[in-house]
Amino acid sequence: MAKYQPTFITHYYRRGSPPFRSLSSLPDDEAVEIMCRLADDTPFGERFKDPLGYLANRRRSEAWVREAFIKKGGKPRLVYPVYCVLGESQWLVKNSPDKSFHQEIRIDLAAFNPGDVSFTYPDSMISYWLDHDRSSEFYMPEFHGKVFTRQEILAIVDHMGNPESDWGSKLPPRLAPYIEAQVWTDIPASRVES
């Protein structure tokens, strides 16, 4: 197997919207309004069908990631992270409602201090949920309910390869198999790859 050693993270966001925003940081009524507009039957939109439930679960999982990252030496400067993926995600591109749905920005990992970015496999909300439902056939104890530092996650992918193609994940097709990166600091334009 060829080594998979991504040197960047990718921020995917809805075309026409500003990048690097978090629903969690918005007032509840504004976040709910956005989620109601985005709710549909795609892998992107189905999570928004219960906007208040989604927002509560999201904030709960974000608090878990933040606390676990601090215990590992992380130094979050934000209350809520900006979401990215390690490397890139063909799953996200393939499952976009349409090809004009998303835009992406790549950011060099070396632009961040180790205490700025945490990682989960897969998406942090799914990891958190699976850790609380260990009877699930999809539960993977070596990954779910775990928050990884950059050094830890890069060692894992160096050994196991690309999670979207090499890991033999037991996740169902509607759940994204990427490694999520949670950025806990502001992302100035100087950090964005051209």
Image (tube, rainbow, N blue to C red):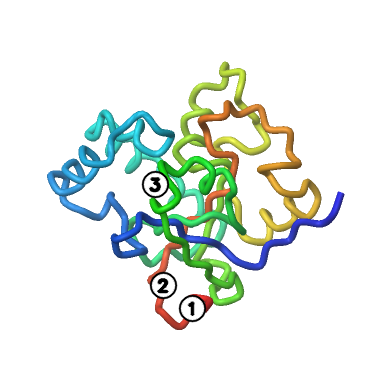
Give the spatial CA distance, label 1 vs label 3. Answer: 24 Å
Closest to the observer: 25 or 15?
A: 15
Question: First in sequence: mark 3 or mark 2?
Answer: 3
Q: Which mark is residue 187?
A: 2
Q: Residues within 10 Å of mark 1 (few under 14, many from 20)?
A: some
User: Taking 194 as reference, is 106 above or below it?
Assistant: above
Q: Quadrant of residue 77?
A: bottom left
Q: Which residue is mark 1?
A: 191
Left/right of residue 35 with respect to residue 68 in the rendered view:
left
Give me the residue at 12% from left, 44% from top.
Answer: 29
What amino acid type should be assigned to the residue bearing mark 2?
Ile
Query: Which residue is farthest bottom?
Result: 190
Answer whether labels 1 and 2 touch (C-beta < 8 Å). yes
Give the spatial CA distance, label 3 vs label 2. Answer: 18 Å
Viewer-side label of 1, 3: 1
Closest to the observer: 15 or 160?
A: 15
Left/right of residue 125 with respect to residue 17 in the rendered view:
right
The x and y percentages for residue 31 are: 20, 46
Viewer-side label of 3, 2: 2
Give me the residue at 28% from left, 50% from top.
Answer: 23
What amino acid type should be assigned to the residue bearing mark 3?
Glu
Q: Residues within 10 Å of mark 2 (few under 14, many from 20)?
A: some
Q: Residues within 10 Å of mark 3 (few under 14, many from 20)?
A: many
What amino acid type should be assigned to the residue bearing mark 1?
Arg
